[in-house]
Amino acid sequence: MKLGARNKVTGRVTSIKSDSIMSLVKFEITNPGEMASVLTTESLEEMNLKMGDEVELVIKAINVLPVKK
């Protein structure tokens, strides 16, 4: 998948809170320490994100896009 964003960090999923529409996923990263992303629950399920998964966090504008490795 080609991404337009150029700022990337690697993180590990530490928390997932979901309802039927949206999900809040928190990530532990080395620097600055922790980030979070709000995404649709459908996207969360399609990526099959689970606690402890390592992801690449792609930062573009105000969005943090998790990309499962």
Image (tube, grey):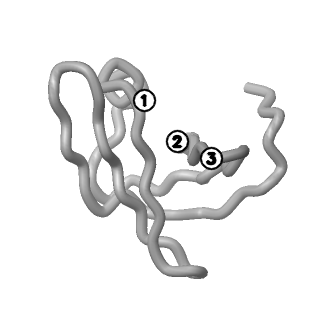
- Earlier-in-chain disc, 3 versus 2: 3
The residue labelled by disc 1 is: 47
2 and 1 marks in contact (CB < 8 Å): yes
- Secondary structure under tag 2 reads strand
Between tags 1 and 3, which lies in front?
3
**Three-letter code for the amino acid on which mark 3 is drawn:** Ile
Q: Residue furthest front?
A: 62
Give percent across and percent down for residue 12. 43, 63
Q: Nearer the viewer, residue 54 or 6?
A: 6
The C terminus sits in image quarter: top right
Q: Residue furthest left?
A: 19
**Three-letter code for the amino acid on which mark 1 is drawn:** Met
Q: CA distance from mark 2 to mark 1?
A: 7 Å
Q: Disc number at residue 62?
A: 3
- Could you tell me which residue is drawn at 29 percent across and 28 percent down? 22
Give the class, few, some or many, for how many residues have Cα within 10 Å of label 3's Cα (few <14, many ≥20): few
Quadrant for residue 13, please give it. Answer: bottom left
- Secondary structure under tag 1 reads helix
